[in-house]
Image (cartoon, rainbow, N blue to C red):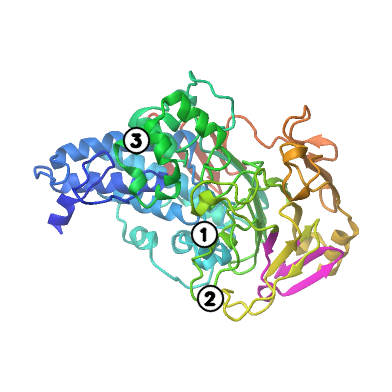
Amino acid sequence: MKERILAFKYWWTEPTPKGVIDSQYYWTENHQIIYLANEYVAGQAFPDDVFGNSGMTGKEHVAHAEERLRTWFSWRARFGFSEWLSNVYWNEDMVGVLLLAEFADDPEIARLASMTLDVLFVELAGHVQKGTFGSTHGRSYQKDKLNGRDEDTFSVAKLAFDQTPVPYDKADSATLLATAERYRPPEVARKIAASKATTVFRTKSSLPLDPHAPIDPDVKAPYGLTFEGEEGLMAWWGLGAQFPWQVAPTSAATVKRYDLFETTNFKQAADLASVVETADDPTIRTLASSLATQVNPGLLTQVDTYTWRSPAVMLSTAQDWRPGQRGEQDHVWQATLDPDALVFTTHPRDDVPSKDDPNANEGYWTGDGAIPRSAQHENVSISIYAPQYEGGSGVGTGAYAFTYLDETHAFFPTEHFDQVVQRDGWTIGRKGDGYVALWSARPTEWRRYAADEFTRGLTEPFDLVAKGGADDVWITEVAQAEDYDSFDAFVAAITASKPEVRSRYACPTRETCPSGGDGTGATVTYRSPSQGELTFGWTPKGTDAGLAPLTVDGKAQDLHPDGLRWDAPFAQADFDDGTYRAELGGATLALDFTKGTRRTTR
């Protein structure tokens, strides 16, 4: 074991052994903390030994990791997590951070780790519904989206909050938390998760970056950051920003220096290798700008999330986030009634996966087509799908090939609901005291599955497809039994509203409209029985009007409020500040990352 630890390559700047193609992925937000935590603890365990791959002593590895860990903790405190509310990668974050909270000898590093875990657990607590982390997610997968108990975070949420009688399915970070001696989640997080109040929790996470902005060779990174060097790569590659023109010169230099086009993760874009090898920085920027839509599918730029939660149902949305651009693993909205009764829509990249190899075509349920323009107010959300690129217009293979299906669809597993009614274009379900209603501007039908196609064991209709084009509008409203005299009353109220949609499609110009759209933009009017008249829209680029706001009874809603990091009745924090406060039922949490102080009461 010691031999393996001393021989390991802990960071991409270390030498790669001869004859080895290093396809380890060091750069995402979660990979950074895992590699750095491992390096720190390994160096701490063997301080005087020389590590064979790097030639550094254990003490030198501790110093190397500590510098970068302090940067990573500072960014999470100031900007949150670019992989926002991820029911996959927050599990990985917790593993790395908990390792440091438990085993770092330096009390300051251990305390920063504990404080970062506090932030994770409060956000997790505010976005769980009956044990399911059923929010919008920066990154998620087919497995984690189709059933709450398959989420990688399910077990740790069950251990921390005990919200569900569903048994543990796997261990993951829950085992580390259960055996932890130093760290315990703050009591206020447990009370937030258990709260029966109906609340709205808004968050802002990640960094702003627009790959479509005009090229400026003197561009400055926001918040005192840099686009250059190793620190620039940590910041921007950590949120999937390898190819925006602002970062592209540094990315190109790094790809060349470390032969990354040979690795598994960069091979998809290897068609660009010959250009990258010879081009100067202005040419690299121009190329990156011209391919901005194609080469940034995994870009996790700044996001504003909005989550309405009641005891019976939760609705969560990423507000107006990268609309029309290529997606990759992002999950823009979801309604959650329990671990089984989940509803969401996607624009699929791939065909239905096969039963024999369901992960081969994850792009059907993960989505990975175009990201909708979505907005939510209280218990109502509207999503407009309008791809801003032609299908198959990409470069390379995989995500960069840019194929997509000319349809959108919803996951609505009817066998996990107590009642389902379809009427006047609406599909409406009840699970216990929770209600959800879903409407599509295009006609919908249940997809019929062949015996060799993947259904995750579902035998009743679950895949509601809107065929005929990748452009569509989906409206969702949720409620609970106490809001109406009966489920029938909810159905009657919902179907009495006749949503109005003009020109589903919004494309960059009339001349480049895919799928025959007319380029006039989309407008939606929905008269909600609970919230009044909502309007939303999408005006094509190049017009003076810009993107239409979400309005409620004529009043525009702020989808991107300045300054907030957390905003909820039980949690407050300012963006780029590093101080957090949560309070509920007499339990409190106060964090100040600048001072390194953590105060909790029960």
Could you tell whether 343 is left or right of 215 in the image?
right
Q: Which residue appears at 42% of the width and 55% of the height?
A: 91
* Residue 111, image quadrant: top left
User: Where does the magenta region start and end?
Assistant: 408-437
Residue 40, how many percent across, how many down? 24, 44
Q: Using the rendered image of the protein, determine whether residue 438 is visible from the camera's viewpoint.
A: yes
Label of residue 141 in the image: 1
Q: Main secondary structure of the magenta part?
A: strand
Residue 459, how many percent across, how many down? 64, 80
Name which residue type carries label 2.
Lys
Q: Using the rendered image of the protein, determine whether residue 435 is visible from the camera's viewpoint.
A: no
Q: Nearer the viewer, residue 383 or 199?
A: 383
Residue 113, how many percent across, how many down? 35, 43
Q: Which residue appears at 50% of the width and 62% of the height?
A: 151
Q: Are marks 3 and 2 in contact (CB under 8 Å)?
A: no
Q: Between marks 3 and 2, how big is the CA–CA gap?
A: 40 Å
Q: Which residue appears at 51% of the width and 32% of the height?
A: 287
Name which residue type carries label 3.
Thr
Label 1 secondary element: loop
Name which residue type carries label 1.
Tyr
Label 2 secondary element: loop
Q: According to the image, label 2 marks what residue? A: 355
Q: How many numbered callouts?
A: 3
Q: Which residue appears at 41% of the width and 69% of the height?
A: 170
108 relative to 127, above or below: above
Q: Earlier in the sequence, mark 3 or mark 1?
A: 1
Q: According to the image, label 3 marks what residue? A: 254
* Residue 66, image quadrant: top left
Q: Residue 428: say if magenta.
A: yes
